Image: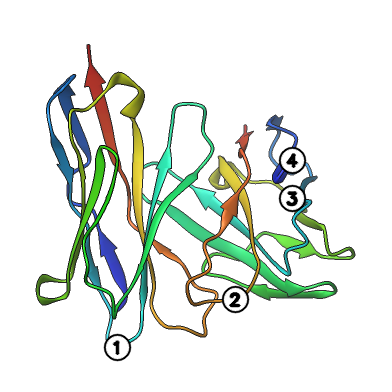
Amino acid sequence: AQKVTQAQTEISVVEKEDVTLDCVYETRDTTYYLFWYKQPPSGELVFLIRRNSFDEQNEISGRYSWNFQKSTSSFNFTITASQVVDSAVYFCALRPSYNTDKLIFGTGTRLQVFP
Amino acid sequence: NAGVTQTPKFRVLKTGQSMTLLCAQDMNHEYMYWYRQDPGMGLRLIHYSVGEGTTAKGEVPDGYNVSRLKKQNFLLGLESAAPSQTSVYFCASSTDRGGYNEQFFGPGTRLTVL
């Protein structure tokens, strides 16, 4: 089965708190790709990051960081010192092999950051 | 560069009416996609196209048709709208299939079928 699970439906934090959004994926392929997208209240989907299955190096981009662990099939996303502008729905997505158009999305996590 | 644009942004239909959603991209991308987004279900692929003149079915194609007569445009049609098609529709495009290529999304079209 190929599947992405984002178990957290909604998370609320107060500004400046750190928050981690969980993403667990399932695939039998050895080559696969993982993505995170942000959907702000305006509605469009904004690409944040991608990872391939051979690159387990964690990545940091400003206040954003991603932790990819093949051993637990997880690709978690952490926002440090959250801000109100981080309020959005965040989607994790899986492309289960190289030669496929398929992009499997999780159900999303709605993050609300209160001032 | 406008990226991916969608027309219209909002639409209300009555059951049985037809309509066409237009997606346009100015990035010279070969691949284009139509998704629908429903509460609690993430995005699901309706149809996609790997190039001008070609289309293929995605995960939830029933009740929809598509056409890709020009490389930059991808049309999604509803011949006889049903309330179950109330959703937000997203168009996306990418430079190549699969692999590391991310998809670029349009702003979405919110469709309500009464």
Q: Which mark is residue A30?
A: 1
- Mark 3 vs mark 4, CA separation in Å: 31 Å
Between marks 1 and 3 in the image, the one whose residue lies nearer the viewer: 1
Picture quadrant of residue A26: bottom left
Q: Is residue A81 left or right of residue B17?
A: left
Between marks 3 and 4 in the image, the one whose residue lies nearer the viewer: 4
In which quadrant is the C terminus of chain A drawn?
A: top left
Between marks 2 and 3 in the image, the one whose residue lies nearer the viewer: 2
- Mark 1 vs mark 2, CA separation in Å: 18 Å
At label 4, which amino acid type do we have? Ala
Q: Which residue is mark 2?
A: B97
* Residue at point 32%, 87% (across, down): A29
Which secondary structure, mark 2? loop
Cβ atoms under marks 3 and 4 closer than 8 Å: no
Q: Position of residue B75 (x, y in %)?
A: 79, 55
In which quadrant is the N terminus of chain A drawn?
A: bottom left
- Mark 2 vs mark 3, CA separation in Å: 31 Å
- Mark 4 vs mark 1, CA separation in Å: 36 Å
* Residue at point 71%, 34% (across, down): B14
Q: Do marks 4 and 1 share a chain?
A: no
Q: Residues within 10 Å of mark 1 (few under 14, many from 20)?
A: few
Residue farthest along the top direction in this orientation? A115
Q: Do marks 3 and 4 share a chain?
A: yes
**In-front residue for pair A15/B9:** A15
Q: Position of residue A11 (x, y in %)?
A: 18, 33
